[in-house]
Image (cartoon, rainbow, N blue to C red):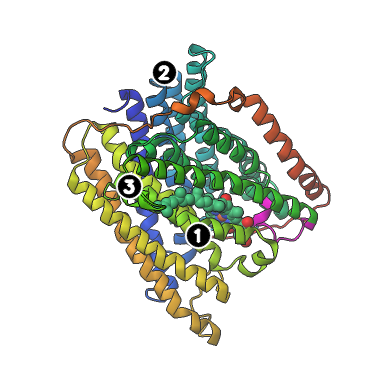
Amino acid sequence: RGIEHRAADLSLAYVLVAYLAFGVAALAGLLQGLVRGGMIELPEFITYYDILTAHGVLMGLVFTTFFIIGFLFSGMAKTMGGLTPTGTKLGWIGWAMMFFGTAMGTATILTGEAAVLYTFYAPMKATPWFYIGAALLIIGSWVAGFGMIHSYRHWRKNNEGKLSPLFAFMAISTMVLWLIATLGVAAEVVLQLIPWSFGWTDKINVVLSRMLFWFFGHPLVYFWLMPAYVAWYAVLPKIIGGKVFSDSLARLAFVLLILFSIPVGFHHQLMDPGISSAWKYVHVVLTLAVVLPSLMTAFSMFAVFENRGRAMGAKGLFGWFAKLPWKDVRFFAPMLGMLFFIPAGIGGIINASNQMNQVVHNTIWVTGHFHLTVGTSVTLTFFGITYWLIPTLTGREMSKRINALGIIQTLTWAIGMLIMSGSMHFMGLLGVPRRTAFTTYLDHVQALKWISYQKLMAIGGVFLFIAAALMVGIVLYLWLFAKKGVTEYPIAENETISSTPRLLERWPVWVTISLCLILIAYGYPIYDVIQNAPPGSPGVKTW
Ligand code: HAS
């Protein structure tokens, strides 16, 4: 196997659950697309909002979190020479808690007791067991995170004075961000939602609950993105035969993501009452700051590709483009993801701009935005990783045939997203709402004009479902049936580490600055909303 066998088993267990969730979520996605397109009607025992919740929770929260933790454990084991026994044990305890929480949450959704969507906004109320499942998923991920931190600290103790490997540094940055960000949602779930759904408190402060959710909700999207960046910075150069462009640039980008991705949550609440426009302005300014590390990443990746192309003899301004290994799915899938990230990022900047947000907020444009970001850039990168990660973990080989199938799978996903997300963006500008079971609003004349785009969206969904089914099949094949052999764990050569300033690995400095920024951006607004809260809401039961 490509890494030490106990770490390989742990990582594999996470990745397999990720794809189990992915398969169910993809089916829910197909159904909801067909419902919105007016092409099918659901049977009586399940509603549109049940499957929308299942899709969002399983795709957005479960697939991502399991995959990310599995991938990060594997790369840490590879670059640090294994995990500590305690780190591995914590990894398994975390896995069990997350698995149990997921099973519990999914059961409540499928039995129709938690149609509250993946953001579980109050005053919509689910059964308490849904929130307890969510809490277990979060706390389990903390335990797994502590497992990574334990192994990392052990490595640093044994390698005093040395900078940690780039992959390990990035993995810890991702988990540090996650540990801080999830404090918001944990507070919301444990202090507000669980007591309220059990009936121990009769009202809920809705403004506070949304604030705590978005304290978590925005860094959540960077928790999805950062592991994709790990693969772009630390793995992809190896796959194309190049090297890391700049170790210090890569680490700085991750530090900036920790600093700026939490104190920005109000950009999801620009249209919410109860928050003054001055505080919204502060969050928008910080949002524009969090764009910087992505621009640095774009610069760095172009440099890696160009350097490699030129080393292979490329001539002219863009000659390097043709030299890239387009037929290798390990490169092709993440590369397409990167290309999609250019319009996806532009969409994000549009969303963050207050006046333009008034046009797109709560329209299906936003759904289009996140299917380009997390659904395409991040997911295609995760697919690209899966193609080599599973055979590495199972001691098998990825054959040429699987590579070819992988290219088809990647293209099918990309075409599906282009059609689906493209029509979502367009419909958003026409004012089509997101998250509604109404297709034609009782044949309202305006809504009838949307329906052909909604059908197009559903067709994109069919492409996506085919690609997802292919992916699940390939995962099963690589796990159980592929030929035994050795697949390399690709970690890029990093010659530039020697010039990296030590300051970049001084965690107390970065965590303190991050906490200060959070205090500035959230301290007063949270105090204010607790102090001057409007009378709380008794809530609306969704079952
Ligand atoms: Fe977002 C809503 C703003 C990035 C996900 N976002 C969402 C929601 C999700 C989400 C899930 O300000 C919906 C939440 C809900 O349910 O309500 N977003 C931004 C901004 C960015 C951004 C400013 N979002 C993401 C990422 C996500 C994600 C990443 C998931 C992974 N987003 C918003 C706002 C809203 C929002 C508002 C609220 C909207 C509303 O009203 O509800 C930025 O971080 C984007 C920066 C990115 C770039 C692109 C850099 C390009 C790169 C690729 C280079 C390509 C190469 C390839 C090298 C500046 C790095 C070249 C190769 C060749 C061969 C040519």
| Badge 2: residue crowd in 10 Å (few <14, some 14–19, many ≥20) | some
Mark 1–mark 2 contact, CB under 8 Å? Answer: no
Outermost residue toward the right in this view:
532
Q: Which residue is mark 1?
A: 343
Is tag 3's residue or tag 2's residue first in the polypeptide sequence?
Answer: 2
Residue 85 shows which numbered tag? 2
Which quadrant holds the N terminus? top left
Mark 3 Cβ and ligand 1 under 8 Å apart: yes
| Badge 3: residue crowd in 10 Å (few <14, some 14–19, many ≥20) | many
Which SS class for mark 1? helix
Q: Amino acid at mark 2?
A: Pro
Nearest to viewer (mark 3 / mark 1)? 3
* Left or right of 208, for residue 449: left
Q: Tell me the magenta residue range.
A: 265-277
Please state the horizontal and vertical placement of residue 11, each as a whole percent of the image: 37, 32
Q: In the depicted view, which residue is nearer to us: 231 or 42? A: 231
Magenta span main SS = loop
Residue 42 in view in this figure: no
Res 220 quadrant in image: top right
Q: Amino acid at mark 3?
A: Leu
Which SS class for mark 2? helix
Q: Which residue is mark 3?
A: 324
Outermost residue toward the left in this view:
483
Q: In the depicted view, which residue is nearer to us: 395 or 206? A: 395
* Left or right of 104, for residue 286: right
Residue 470 shows which numbered tag? none
Q: Residue at x 77, y 52 (%)?
A: 279
Mark 3–mark 1 contact, CB under 8 Å? Answer: no
Q: Is 125 rendered above or below residue 216? A: below
Q: Is 119 rendered above or below residue 143? A: below
Outermost residue toward the bottom in this view:
445
Please state the horizontal and vertical placement of residue 79, each as a whole percent of the image: 40, 25
